[in-house]
């Protein structure tokens, strides 16, 4: 029922947006008013039927949820007694438990399932590593400053906020044509270059928040935290902006550990650091955050996946380039098998991880109807990338990128090979040796030494590292009596005829050396948690003060609570025994022996998302020895023998059984008014 109402709200909102773009003004205004009334009606119907705040009541939902999250200490601003520092948060007891549970689900879902090689690398990274990866030169956002106060702001955030305010301005509404123009710009704000960003800020007269002062032209700001390594401070380092580089620099040893076999995947869970210009939106944009990253190494000539059939029939919402450029601009469900066969997703391995990511999100409690995979447009793509998709979740802040899934080709290993001079390649052994024509590059050491002297070694290595196409191009110039430039890491040298011999020869080879391509799924754990918080939050029907966090049992911070009905030593003793049995079964639990009514105790634990509650009453000690087991969302209760309670809850948490099956097996217990 609630899913149907949510869908009706979504359709009504889309109708309002579409009508807002209609050019026939007189008829459009009347139609728009009718559609808005329909939308409001559906929102009220949804809230009345479910007790939940609809996704369209953004400010109300966000404020109510923030109150619960901070009051119950899921997470709070860091250094609070000193006024806090933007972009840093402390996780409290339930937040720590959820984060630990979520990362363990991730580890089981990916690392265990795929037999991945997990590593843990330092957060402090030498400059040379991040120079090779491109982060030192290119890991930037555009910043602007208040022309009077000097306060700093992130340019794309200012532009986004200004454009959204224009669309929502009821007193001075923009024309339908302008609204379409603004929405087109909003869709591409994150990809604007420096000049086009400056032009957009100027065109829309964006000013500094709070003061209304002029702002500076945008300029790049590197997001990495710089530090020094060692007592002398003469080695530059950075706090890592991502966990991926630790995997790349360990590729050679991981390949050896894996017996030299490809494909294989390596994974790392750890904290990353980005000096955000203007952190906002809680856990969605912070300066320290937990990443879970996978680097799947594969032969670039064969990106099939042996398990692709297991996800080929899944139909997540895909927002392809074609749909983004089309009139409707809406994601559509499509089977991953069809997406690969039509060339929408570049290869099976990338599509496989999209499917597994979708299943992971469903497992941890993200609504699949409010999740999509958006393909990067051509101008967004790095020059080396074959295909990129973002896993996005709809929240009160709009669509939030939580996962990046990219086919990065062989760029990363090639970049570290060039900088480190260490061979980061793999060897594909043929079943039987083959006679093949190869290009051989034979430097003339005597001639190179006479001309280049101390640079002879660098020039020789650069010549020997040439790929076949580059070597043949060089040979063609030399054969014509011309000189040819040769780039090394530090300089460019002119190669003349006689310095090198380049020829084709036929050889018997047993295999092929190549630099593997990389498929990279990268997960922001904090962002996923926040999206899950929003999707899980609701209030009891008829009582907006009773908040519930409807967590899936697998990620819930506490799996069960145990309540003695009243304060009696005999009841407390039975409750303590059941608690010990739950703990022995690996189930986190709480005993609440306060004098509050059962109803108040239920409400308090519902607010932190405890899925099951056990109540010990007088029948538990004087009657049949059973206890009441309550399920949070339905509030249904059954009587379960004390000896079976731990195993029943364990099976529910592990999803080996369902509440419907438990309710069918055990006698129902009617709740009293005091209990609910």
Image: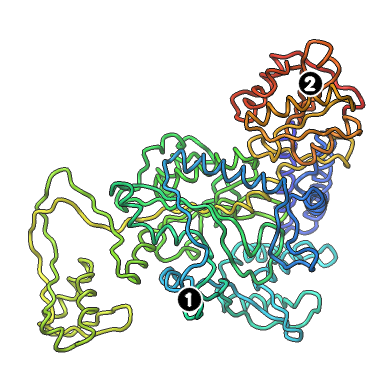
Reply above or below: 449 against 68.
Answer: below
Where residue 531 appears, as percent x and y from the top left, is: 67, 49
Q: How many numbered discs sit on the rendered protein?
A: 2
Q: Could you tell me which residue is drawn at 51 percent across and 39 percent down? A: 108
Where residue 559 appears, as percent x and y from the top left, is: 70, 34
Reply above or below: 439 against 343.
Answer: below
Quarter location, residue 460: bottom left
- Tell whether 630 sits left or right of 433: right
**Residue 628 marker:** 2
Circle 1 sits on which residue?
Answer: 137
Looking at the image, which is closer to me, 608 or 488? 608
Where residue 289 appears, as percent x and y from the top left, is: 61, 58
Sequence-wise first label, 2 or 1: 1
Quarter location, residue 85: bottom right
The C terminus sits in image quarter = top right
> Of circles 2 and 1, which is in front?
2
Where residue 482 appears, as percent x and y from the top left, is: 16, 85
Kindly report the distance in space between the C-alpha atoms of the residues bearing marks 2 and 1.
62 Å
- Tell whether 676 sits left or right of 650: right
- Tell whether 59 sits left or right of 463: right
Looking at the image, which is closer to me, 671 or 502? 671
Marks 2 & 1, CB-CB < 8 Å contact: no
Q: Could you tell me which residue is drawn at 46 percent across and 39 percent down? A: 112
Looking at the image, which is closer to me, 458 or 12? 458
Reply above or below: 561 against 223.
Answer: above
Label 1 environment density (alpha carbons within 10 Å; few <14, some 14–19, many ≥20): few
Looking at the image, which is closer to me, 24 or 491? 491
Label 2 environment density (alpha carbons within 10 Å; few <14, some 14–19, many ≥20): many
Q: Secondary structure at mark 2?
A: strand
């Amino acid at each position: 029922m609630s899913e149907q109402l949510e869908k009706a709200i979504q359709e009504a909102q889309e109708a309002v947006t579409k009508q807002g773009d209609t050019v026939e003004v007189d008829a459009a205004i009347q139609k728009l008013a009718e559609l808005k009334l329909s939308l409001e009606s559906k929102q009220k119907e949804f809230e009345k039927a479910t007790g939940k705040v609809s996704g369209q009541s953004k400010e109300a939902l966000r404020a109510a949820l923030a109150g619960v999250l901070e009051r119950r200490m899921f997470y709070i601003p860091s250094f609070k007694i000193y006024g806090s520092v933007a972009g840093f948060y402390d996780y409290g007891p339930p937040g720590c438990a959820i984060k630990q549970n979520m990362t363990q689900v991730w580890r089981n879902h990916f690392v265990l399932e795929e037999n991945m090689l997990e590593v843990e690398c330092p957060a402090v990274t030498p400059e040379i590593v991040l120079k090779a990866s491109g982060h030192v030169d290119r890991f930037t956002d555009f910043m602007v400053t208040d022309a009077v106060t000097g306060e700093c702001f992130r340019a794309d955030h200012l532009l986004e906020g200004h454009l959204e305010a224009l669309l929502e301005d009821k007193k001075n509404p923009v024309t339908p044509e302008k609204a379409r123009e603004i929405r087109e710009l909003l869709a591409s704000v994150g990809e604007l270059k420096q000049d086009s960003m400056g032009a957009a800020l100027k065109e829309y007269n964006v000013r500094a928040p709070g003061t209304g002062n002029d702002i500076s032209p945008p300029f790049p700001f590197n997001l990495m935290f710089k530090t020094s390594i060692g007592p002398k401070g003469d080695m530059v380092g950075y706090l890592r902006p991502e966990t991926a580089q630790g995997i790349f620099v360990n590729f050679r040893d991981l390949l050896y550990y894996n017996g030299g076999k490809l494909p294989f995947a390596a994974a790392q869970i750890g904290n990353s650091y980005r000096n955000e210009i203007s952190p906002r939106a809680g856990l969605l944009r912070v300066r320290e955050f937990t990443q879970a990253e996978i680097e799947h190494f594969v032969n670039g000539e064969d990106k099939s996946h042996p398990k692709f059939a297991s996800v080929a029939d899944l139909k997540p919402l895909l927002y392809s380039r074609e749909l983004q450029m089309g009139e409707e601009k809406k994601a559509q469900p499509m089977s991953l098998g069809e997406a690969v066969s039509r060339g929408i997703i570049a290869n099976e391995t990338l599509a496989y991880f999209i499917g597994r990511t979708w299943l992971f999100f469903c497992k941890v409690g993200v609504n699949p109807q409010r999740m999509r995979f958006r393909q990067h447009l051509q101008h967004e793509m790095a020059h080396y990338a074959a295909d990129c998709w973002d896993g996005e979740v709809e929240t009160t802040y709009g669509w939030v990128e939580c996962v990046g899934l990219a086919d990065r080709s062989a760029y990363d290993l090639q970049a570290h090979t060039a900088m480190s001079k260490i061979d980061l390649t793999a060897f594909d052994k043929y079943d039987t040796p083959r006679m093949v024509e190869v290009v051989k590059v034979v430097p003339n050491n005597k001639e190179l030494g006479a001309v280049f002297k101390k640079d002879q070694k660098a020039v020789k290595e650069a010549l020997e590292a040439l790929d076949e196409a580059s070597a043949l191009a060089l040979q063609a110039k030399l054969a014509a009596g011309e000189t040819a430039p040769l780039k090394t890491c530090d300089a460019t040298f002119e190669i003349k005829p006689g310095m090198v011999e380049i020829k084709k020869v036929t050889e018997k080879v047993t295999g092929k050396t190549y630099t593997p391509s990389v498929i990279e799924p990268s997960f922001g754990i904090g962002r996923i948690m926040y999206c899950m918080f929003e999707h899980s939050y609701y209030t009891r029907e008829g009582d907006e003060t009773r908040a519930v966090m409807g967590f899936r049992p697998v990620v819930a911070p506490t799996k069960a609570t145990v309540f003695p009905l009243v304060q009696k030593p005999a009841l407390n003793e039975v409750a303590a025994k059941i608690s010990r049995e739950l703990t022995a079964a690996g189930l986190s639990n709480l005993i609440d022996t306060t004098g509050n009514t059962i109803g108040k105790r239920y409400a308090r634990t519902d607010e932190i998302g405890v899925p099951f509650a056990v109540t010990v009453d007088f029948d538990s000690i004087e009657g049949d020895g059973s206890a009441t087991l309550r399920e949070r969302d339905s509030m249904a209760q059954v009587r379960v023998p004390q000896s079976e309670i731990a195993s029943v809850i364990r099976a529910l948490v592990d999803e080996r059984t369902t509440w419907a099956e438990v309710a069918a097996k055990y006698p129902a217990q009617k709740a009293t008014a005091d209990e609910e």
